Image (cartoon, rainbow, N blue to C red):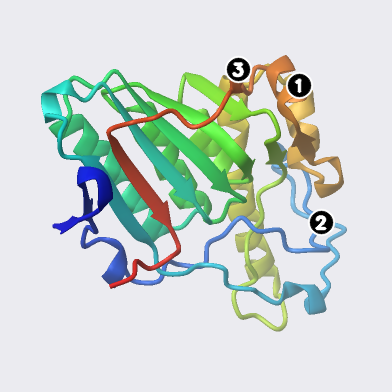
Amino acid sequence: MKRGPYGFELSTPLWGAKAMPPSMKADFYVHNIFLPSFFSGRLMKNIKISLASLLLVPFFSMASMTVVKNDTVNNVDIDVAKILYVGGVDEAKVVELISAIDEINIKYKNTRKIFLYINSSGGDMDSGYMAYEAVRNSTIPIVTVNASMTGSSATMMYCGAKERLMMSGAYFLLHPAATANKGFDYLKPDVINNLHEEVVAYNKMFFDIYKECTEFSTTEIEQFLNNEGARKRMDYKSSLLVKLSSGVSMGFVPAPVVYYISDQKPNN
């Protein structure tokens, strides 16, 4: 355990440093793939694909988590904990998020609330859904806070909490799920059908969660989940109107134990 200034302990769990790179099942937008409504069971038609736009730009990197704790405070006296999540949504960082939530629930049983600050443009849909379930099922209530930008699959993590706040200058991005064209130069009917099935399943994830954590109508959700041009970029005023957020955060709450999760590797 490294000792930091002002009596804080610094520790780096084993998770991130040796995590394997995550799969590339991301929700990043693949331009010029036009899909029919995910509520329709009919065969796809009128599909236009621009192969030049199917180049994948990997944005995943090795994650790291640092824990800072005031060692003058006993575990039983800790009443609030804080997690700062910065970067894309991927397997490594979400495992660290779940690890942090579990550790707080186990070690700091008298904690009243966990504040989870999010700054993420999204990423892997499956990891985003795991984060949603972890936040939703925490024994200690979690308050999610949009610290600057929460977009795409990161909105699922955000929606896992009953109490959801945001900074006054933060915004959300709600848009359709997408799936990657994984190494195919030419798309045959079965490949197209597989891509369609995957994006339909991911859009269903979004739909069910947005129906639960917003007051958008079914029609409104269908519109922005079926058309990138209808995407929703929402500031705090519009987010409060549809109950995506329940209030504005005035800043970062002080806490005697803080978990920092990001793509940055700690200095040795």
Q: Give the left or right position of residue 159, taking residue 62 as reference.
A: right
Find disc 1 in the rendering and name its residue: 237
Q: Position of residue 243 (x, y in %)?
A: 65, 17
Find numbered disc 1 in the image and state the secondary structure of the residue it sits on.
helix
Name the residue nearer the viewer: 113 or 234: 113
Question: In which quadrant will I find the N terminus?
Answer: bottom left
- Type of amino acid under label 3: Gly
Residue drawn 53% across and 23% down? 164
Residue at the image point whose x is 33% and y is 55% from the top: 65
Residue 230: where, in percent of width, then height? 84, 40
User: What number is the disc on residue 34?
Assistant: 2
Q: CA distance from mark 2 to mark 1?
A: 31 Å
Q: Mark 2 or mark 1, which is nearer to you?
A: 1
Q: Amino acid at mark 1?
A: Lys
- Residue at mark 3: 247
Asked if the residue at tag 1 contacts the one at tag 2, i.e. Cβ–Cβ closer than 8 Å, the answer is no
Spatial CA span between label 2 and label 3:
36 Å
> Is label 2 in a helix, a strand or a loop?
loop
- Tell us which disc is closer to us: 2 or 3: 3
Which quadrant: the C terminus? bottom left
State the residue at coordinates (39%, 28%). Answer: 136
